[in-house]
Amino acid sequence: MLFRSGPDSANKFITYYFRHKFTVEDTSGFLSLVLGVVRDDGAVVYLNGKEVFRSNMPSGTITYTTKASAAVGGADESTFFETDVDPTQLLKGTNTLAVEIHQSGGDSSDVSFNLQLAGLRALPVVVPELEARSTEAGIELTWPASSAAVLQASDRADAAGGWQVLNGVTVETIDGLRTARLPAVDSQRFFRLVLP
């Protein structure tokens, strides 16, 4: 990107403005947003008009003449400085990120900027289906071997039923299915799969 840096090399612009629009179809389910900014020298970042991050900038009101707190050099010129952003700041549809990059002085030798915004969504928790089948010897329970779910049993179907992991039961894995074979009993029993 080419832009004018100011009237002369000893009197460059202090502040540069950037804006980017992006679309979010579904704002639900975000666990977190992480914003990372490379800034030389300082930055103020806004999401949908609200300030969400300030880096190497003084506190208080920021204007186009506000200078960065300090000149940046070395590794700090290419480091992403990160912060967590409240995911409820996202809007369904069009969102706008706006960034001000401020120099520490009008004689700064360079200006640089980069930004990343990453969202982490919760994956849906899918408990696998447990299938039961009567056999001559008792009951056969099967569920997908790809699941980390644990088989439990109880004499009652409600949550307070004293569910217990079935210990001492042999579970075989064949053709992508786990199979537990249980002997027949005279009392009623309930079974479920629970994710650890």
Image (tube, rainbow, N blue to C red):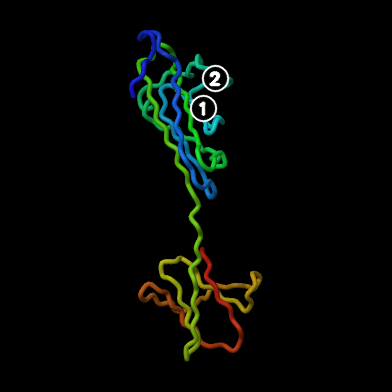
Q: Residue 149 at what x, y percent from top left?
A: 48, 67
Single out the residue that lies furthest toward the left. Answer: 2
Q: Residue 160 at what x, y percent from top left?
A: 66, 70
Report the residue marked by disc 2: 62
Give left or right: position of 86 versus 173.
Answer: right
Image height check: is 168 above or below 123?
A: below
Q: Residue at x 51, y 44 (%)?
A: 32
Q: What's the mark number on residue 54?
A: 1
Q: Quadrant of residue 72?
A: top left
Q: Amino acid at mark 2?
A: Ile
Q: Residue 77 at what x, y percent from top left?
A: 37, 25
Could you tell which of marks 2 and 1 lies nearer the N-terminus? 1
Determine crowd level at label 2: few under 14, some 14-19, many 20+ residues with C-alpha closer than 10 A.
few
Determine crowd level at label 1: few under 14, some 14-19, many 20+ residues with C-alpha closer than 10 A.
some
Q: Residue at x 48, y 16 (%)?
A: 67
Image height check: is 194 above or below 16?
A: below
Q: Secondary structure at mark 2?
A: loop
